[in-house]
Image: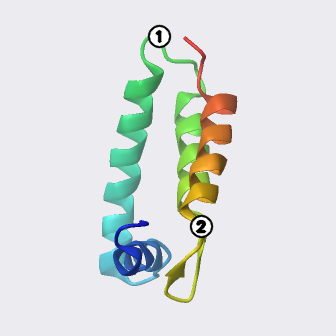
Amino acid sequence: MSRQPKLGAAVFTSLSSPDPAAVVCQQQITKLMEAIVLRAIGEPAPPDAGERSRMIGHVGTRPWWVGSTVVDVGRVHDELAVAVRLLLPED
């Protein structure tokens, strides 16, 4: 996002679009992100692993942008680090 702020803004805009074509992409991105988080959690996954993954996704894709300008990427990183620490098992 910091290297390509316009691309980051476009991605976040598409993630909140009600357009039917965008909704299909949103669902694909959600599945991909959940798979990445579930892999990071490892086995055995806690019973609420899907919910944890979804919460991390919400933190990572919340409106960190205003208009077409991405807000401080360091803040996004810090917020994600907190979410991951709280939601993922330490081991």
Q: Residue at x 43, y 12 (%)?
A: 43
For the image shown, how many numbered marks are present on the structure? 2
Residue 30 vertical placement versus 45 (above, below): below
Quarter location, residue 35 = top left
As rendered, which of 67 and 29 lies closer to the eye?
A: 67
Residue 1 at x, y percent in the picture:
41, 66
How packed mark 2 is, by other alpha carbons closer than 10 Å (few <14, some 14-19, many 20 or more), is few
Residue 74 vertical placement versus 84 (above, below): below
Quarter location, residue 23 = bottom left
Residue 58 vertical placement versus 33 (above, below): below
Q: Residue at x 46, y 82 (%)?
A: 18
Quadrant where the C terminus lies?
Answer: top right
> In the visual, does 31 lie left or right of 16?
left
As rendered, which of 45 and 64 lies closer to the eye?
A: 64
> In the visual, does 32 lie left or right of 90?
left
How packed mark 1 is, by other alpha carbons closer than 10 Å (few <14, some 14-19, many 20 or more), is few
Q: Which mark is residue 44?
A: 1
As rendered, which of 20 and 87 lies closer to the eye?
A: 87
Q: Which mark is residue 72?
A: 2
Q: Amino acid at mark 2?
A: Asp
Q: CA distance from mark 2 to mark 1?
A: 35 Å
